[in-house]
Image (cartoon, rainbow, N blue to C red):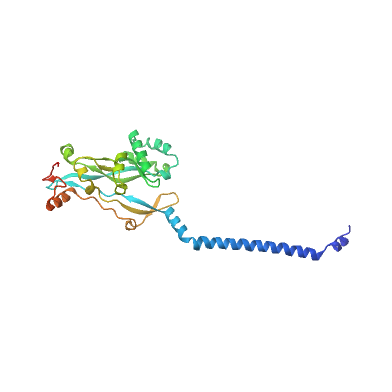
Amino acid sequence: MPLNSYEALRDLHEERRTFGMRAAVAGILGLVCVVLLVGRLADLQIIQHSYFSTRSDDNRMRVLPVPPVRGLIYDRNGAMLAQNQPAFELEITPEQVDNLKDTLDRLSKLVHITDVDIARFRDRMRKTPHYRSVVLRSNLSADEVARYELNRYDFDGVDITAGLVRSYPLGPATAHVIGYVGGITETDYANLDESQYQGLTQIGRTGIERSHEDELRGTPGARIVEANAGGRAARSQCARRAGRQKPGTDARRQAADDRRAGTRRTGWRGGRHRSA
């Protein structure tokens, strides 16, 4: 068919009408999408701003316990009977570890870890939120710390922190009076106020360590930590925003207060522990 005949058959009016309808439908659909997008944006940014802002802070900010420093024990002449010494602890944050068993196996090649350590760690892990670190081993030697630091890059969620361990300068000579501290067991957790042991792993077992547990233990605090995308602490906020920890009371001072009050609560006289 000749080109002139084809042009003559075209209905220009119908084509214009069809094009106009299609353009109108496309415009309406585009407008509806814009309205929905603006509405959703307003819902997120204005109506639900407080909700999502709180969720964001919860993901970014974490409240971690700050264990109190255990109180010291003196005799009436001021001689040290129980003190705290600095020590290194190996900690794992379960939330940041993909394969816990593999991590423990690789750590055992760098640090001496016994089956008892692993069992105690798993027991503590069950009682602790996964975003909080759990102590795997205490009293690491300088060699163990050095070996770990050389391979630190290969262990996500694992860290070594400086802590305090209980020490008795007079050793066995006062063990029957001063007693000792030990790890908190399942039975202990069932009979104590867990809020008073946040971040703590030890409790007084015998002697003055046990009878003065409430005074020596102190009060746990908390600190707000800002975490990065990898879950590691990037910056610590002021401890007052979460709660400041209170160190334990020294036993000698507490005993003196009791004597002035005329009580026998401490059973502490002249540097000797007297049983009730």
Residue 247: x and y in percent read: 25, 51
Q: Quadrant of the C terminus?
A: top left
Q: Quadrant of the N terminus?
A: bottom right
Q: Residue at x 33, y 41 (%)?
A: 145
Q: Does 251 sit left or right of 234 as displayed?
A: left
**Between 155 and 149, the one nearer to me in the picture:** 155
Residue 245: x and y in percent read: 28, 53
Q: Does 80 sit left or right of 28 as displayed?
A: left
Residue 140 makes an appearance in the image: no
Residue 178: x and y in percent read: 18, 41
Residue 224 makes an appearance in the image: yes
Q: Residue furthest top?
A: 115
Reply above or below: 247 against 42: above
| Image label count | 0
**Between 176 and 187, the one nearer to me in the picture:** 187
Reply above or below: 39 against 164: below
**Between 246 and 103, the one nearer to me in the picture:** 246
